[in-house]
Amino acid sequence: MVRFEFPPTFVESVLWAARGDGLEEGEDDRSALERELVEEVGLRDPTVGPLIWTRTHLVPMSTGHDGQSERFYLRETKPLEPRPALSEEQLLAEFVTGLRWWTLEELAAADTVFAQRALPTLLEALLADGPPSQPIDVGI
C-alpha cells in the first residue's frame, strides 16, 4: 500500500491506499495495473487475477476531475521490499510519501485511515471465502 499526503483542502489529508493511477493512452485495466506495480512498487511480471472489488469516489481533484472509479484485482505475492521504478521526486509529485506491506493483523490494529474504510473486514472475508463470483462495490 502507499501513504498519501494530500494538501489540507482534501477531505482526508493523510491516508493509506492501494496504489493505482489513471489509464494511459491505449491501456486497459490490467495493463495499467501491471505498469503501476512496476513503477510504484517494483513488482515485475505480475500475474493479475480476477476483478474482486469496485469503488467510485467523488471528490474534487486538482486535475479538474470530480473523482475516480477504481477496480481492484486480486494479486497474490510474497512480501517484498518495495523498490519503485519512479524516483522519490516523481512519487512526491503524486503525493506518495510511503510504501509498505501490511499483514491483516496490522491492518486491523492500525490507527490510520485507509481509502477503503472497511479494508481489514474486506480482506478477512476474501481470505475466508475466496474471490467473489462477481465484483463487490466496496464503497468508501
Image (spheres, rainbow, N blue to C red):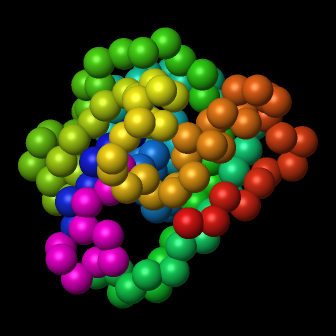
Q: Residue furthest right?
A: 133
Residue 112 in sight from this viewpoint: yes
Answer with the quarter of the image where residue 63 lies. Answer: bottom left
In which quadrant will I find the N terminus? top left
Q: Main secondary structure of the magenta part?
A: loop
Magenta stretch, residue numbers:
7-16
Pick whichever, 3 or 25, lies toward us: 3
Q: Nearer the viewer, residue 62 or 126?
A: 126
Question: Which of the two residues, 93 or 101, is positioned nearer the viewer here?
Answer: 101
- 128, above or below 96, in the image: above
Closest to the observer, 45 or 60: 60
Identify the residue at horizontal 23%, vertical 51% (top origin): 96
Q: Is residue 55 left or right of residue 59?
A: right
- Image quarter (top left, top right, bottom left or bottom right) of the C terminus: bottom right
Check if residue 77 falls in the magenta segment. Answer: no
Residue 133 appears at what percent x and percent y? 89, 42
Left or right: 76 in relation to 94 = right
Residue 83, given in percent of the width and then of the height, sits at: 25, 25
Q: Answer yes or no: is residue 38 visible.
A: no
Residue 11 magenta: yes
User: In the image, is residue 81 above or below residue 13?
Assistant: above
Q: Horizontal placement of 53 versus 7: left or right? A: right
Looking at the picture, does residue 67 appear above or below residue 121?
A: below
Q: Return the x and y of residue 124 as percentages of the image width and height.
A: 66, 33
Instruction: Tell me where residue 58 appears, x and y as whole percent.
Output: 51, 80
Image: 82 above or below 26: above
89 left or right, relative to 102: left
| Residue drawn 51% across the image and 57% down it | 117
Residue at 63 percent across and 36 percent down: it is 123
